């Protein structure tokens, strides 16, 4: 039996709360930037710092106090209430390697999903002090100003971004190379920042693999509400259960060309 419809959420108020969370995470991270950043290595060989854990713990406390009936899916601590209608998705520092090495392309990702589908997203870069906010039903904003993705770009004229090619398996690498050679040029290492740049029209395509829900859920409302398109590599909408691949394009038309290149055998 399907769940009954809930009253429509107050998305503007939830977006303000998400930005409050981003203010909170940014203050912690900026204070830590001047300190030496030691790290541990997790079981998947990815690094984690004490700041990752401190930021997520702080955001979780705020969420539990303000929205005790919502679930939380985070990177550093166990998930809570994923069966609930509203689930917050947290990546305290997306780009921990960049953070450790002082390269300012890392950021905090905050998303709210309704029945598994992201409806609100925040990318907050605490160093460049750029913040993208995407909320279903309203235009995406960067630092409070509405932005739109670039339209009318042919695949051969498009610029491409990839955060890190290392997670690609052999088939993914072949698909990525088919796409890469058909675009104008590719930039690497942008991380979450690259998806903000698709939303504001500076970049045409961003593609990654080896991701988790906390890596891509915040990106979806931001790209989508700027007029772009974002999906898994098969073209399916992103949910908290979408696997590990994500691709975003500046327009639905360009996205179809991108998906065609990824599907070719």
Image (cartoon, rainbow, N blue to C red):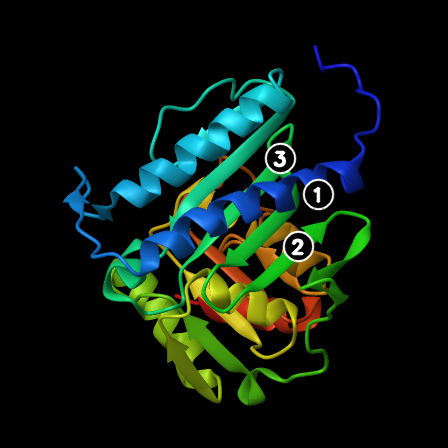
Q: Position of residue 162 (x, y in %)?
A: 40, 69
At 42% from the left and 47% from the top, the residue drawn is: 28
From the image, state whether disc 2 or disc 3 is nearer to you.
2
**Cβ atoms at labels 1 and 3 below 8 Å apart:** no
From the image, state whether disc 1 or disc 3 is nearer to you.
1
SS at mark 1? helix
Query: Could you give the CA–CA distance between mark 1 and mark 3, rounded to whole angstroms?
Result: 12 Å
- Which residue is denoted by mark 1 in the rendering? 15
* Horizontal side of residue 147 vs 24, given as left or right: right
Query: Could you give the CA–CA distance between mark 2 and mark 3, rounded to whole angstroms?
Result: 14 Å
SS at mark 3? strand
- Which residue is denoted by mark 2 in the rendering? 133
Neighbourhood count class around disc 3 (C-alpha, 10 Å): few under 14, some 14–19, many 20 upward: many
* Horizontal side of residue 116 vs 12, given as left or right: left
Q: Position of residue 90 (x, y in %)?
A: 48, 39
- Quarter of the image where one finds residue 187: bottom left
Q: Position of residue 174 (x, y in %)?
A: 32, 69
Q: Is residue 163 visible?
A: yes
Neighbourhood count class around disc 2 (C-alpha, 10 Å): few under 14, some 14–19, many 20 upward: many
Neighbourhood count class around disc 1 (C-alpha, 10 Å): few under 14, some 14–19, many 20 upward: some
- Quarter of the image where one finds residue 34: bottom left
* Horizontal side of residue 203 vs 165, given as left or right: right
Earlier along the polypeptide chain: callout 1 or callout 2? 1
Q: Position of residue 206 (x, y in %)?
A: 49, 68
Q: Is residue 83 above or below residue 104?
A: above
- Quarter of the image where one finds residue 71: top right
Image quadrant holding the C terminus, namely bottom left
At 55% from the left and 28% from the top, the residue drawn is: 62
- Which residue is denoted by mark 3 in the rendering? 113
Q: Is residue 217 visible?
A: no
Earlier along the polypeptide chain: callout 2 or callout 3? 3
**Cβ atoms at labels 1 and 2 below 8 Å apart:** yes
């Amino acid at each position: 039996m399907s769940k009954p419809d809930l009253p429509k959420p107050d998305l503007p108020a939830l977006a303000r709360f998400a930005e409050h969370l981003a203010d909170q995470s940014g203050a912690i991270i900026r204070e830590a930037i001047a300190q030496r950043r030691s790290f541990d290595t997790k079981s998947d060989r990815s690094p984690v710092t004490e700041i990752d854990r401190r930021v997520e713990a702080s955001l979780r406390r705020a969420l539990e106090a303000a929205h005790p009936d919502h679930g939380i899916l985070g990177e550093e601590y166990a998930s809570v209430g994923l069966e609930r209608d509203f689930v917050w998705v947290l990546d305290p520092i997306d780009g921990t390697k960049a953070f450790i090495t002082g390269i300012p392309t890392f950021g905090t990702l905050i998303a709210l999903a309704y029945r598994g589908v992201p409806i609100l997203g925040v990318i907050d870069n605490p160093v460049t002090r750029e913040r993208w906010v995407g909320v279903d039903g309203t235009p995406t904003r960067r630092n409070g100003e509405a932005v739109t993705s670039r339209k009318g770009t042919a695949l051969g004229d498009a610029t491409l971004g990839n955060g890190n090619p290392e997670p690609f398996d052999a088939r993914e690498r072949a698909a990525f190379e088919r796409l890469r050679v058909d675009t104008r040029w590719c930039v690497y290492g942008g991380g979450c920042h690259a998806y903000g740049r698709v939303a504001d029209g500076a970049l045409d395509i961003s593609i990654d693999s080896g991701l988790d829900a906390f890596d891509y859920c915040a990106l979806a409302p931001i790209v989508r509400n700027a007029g772009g398109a974002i999906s898994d590599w098969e073209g399916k909408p992103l949910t908290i259960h979408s696997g590990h691949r994500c691709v975003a394009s500046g327009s639905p038309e360009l996205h179809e060309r991108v998906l065609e290149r990824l599907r070719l055998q």
